[in-house]
């Protein structure tokens, strides 16, 4: 367990204890640290040996999980220690004058296209003082979704809009009852 994963686990367990057991932050953090440390010690004591993969030609229905687990483990070992990579296998080139082969690079993920509304903005009347609210009723103004990046179209924004609309309906109902 890396220090980062340990601290993340402690942080998550602290919040769970604060919410579930109604503890203050210091007490919950102390208990969470003890629990996660004990769990890490148990995990280290009972750490399974990585499975040994059979040669590629011998993958069967019965050992496919072991082969897959061994390959994943080998990848994770290489990712953990990139400096200890084995030397590259020799290439079978006739001459050393041939240019090296460029590695394949995956194309970058494309981002959604952002459309900017280029309509001219309305100008305030010449006799109005800019920056001063003029009106009798203060209401929230809904801004159309076209003004925002597509990433911002989420559940929170929809709930916010629904809340504003519900408040305006309530205000109209109250005004109608008076």
Image (spheres, rainbow, N blue to C red):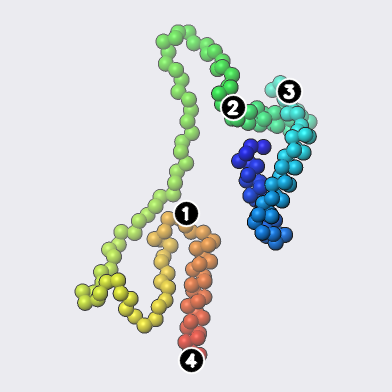
Residue toward you, 51 or 25: 25
Spot occupied by residue 71 in the image (x, y as percentages of width and height):
67, 28
6 over 50 or under it: above or below? below
Residue occupied by mark 3: 54
Pointer 3 or 4: first along the chain: 3
Label 3 – label 4 distance at C-alpha: 82 Å
Are there few (<14), some (14-19), or many (20+) residues within 10 Å of tag 2?
few
Spot occupied by residue 79 in the image (x, y as percentages of width and height):
59, 30
Residue occupied by mark 4: 178
Q: Are marks 4 and 1 in contact (CB under 8 Å)?
A: no
Q: Are marks 3 and 1 in contact (CB under 8 Å)?
A: no
The numbered dot on residue 81 is 2
Residue occupied by mark 1: 151
Which residue is at a point 24% across and 76% down the rendered structure image?
128
Nearest to viewer (mark 4 / mark 2):
2
Residue 61 in view: no
Which residue is at a point 48% across and 88% down the rendered structure image?
176
Nearest to viewer (mark 3 / mark 4):
4
Name the element at disc 1.
helix
């Amino acid at each position: 367990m890396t220090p980062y994963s340990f601290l993340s686990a402690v942080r998550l367990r602290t919040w769970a204890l604060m919410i579930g057991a109604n503890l203050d932050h210091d007490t919950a953090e102390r208990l969470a640290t003890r629990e996660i440390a004990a769990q890490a010690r148990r995990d280290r004591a009972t750490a399974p040996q990585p499975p040994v993969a059979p040669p590629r030609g011998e993958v069967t229905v019965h050992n496919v999980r072991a082969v897959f687990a061994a390959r994943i483990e080998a990848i994770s070992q290489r990712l953990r220690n990139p400096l200890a990579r084995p030397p590259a296998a020799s290439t079978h080139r006739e001459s050393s004058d041939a240019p090296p082969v460029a590695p394949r690079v995956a194309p970058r993920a494309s981002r959604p296209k952002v459309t900017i509304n280029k309509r001219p903005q309305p100008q305030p009347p010449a006799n109005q003082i800019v920056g001063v609210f003029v009106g009798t009723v203060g209401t929230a103004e809904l801004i159309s979704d076209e003004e925002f990046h597509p990433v911002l179209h989420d559940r929170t924004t929809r709930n916010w809009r629904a809340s504003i609309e519900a408040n305006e309906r309530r205000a109209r109902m109250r005004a109608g009852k008076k």
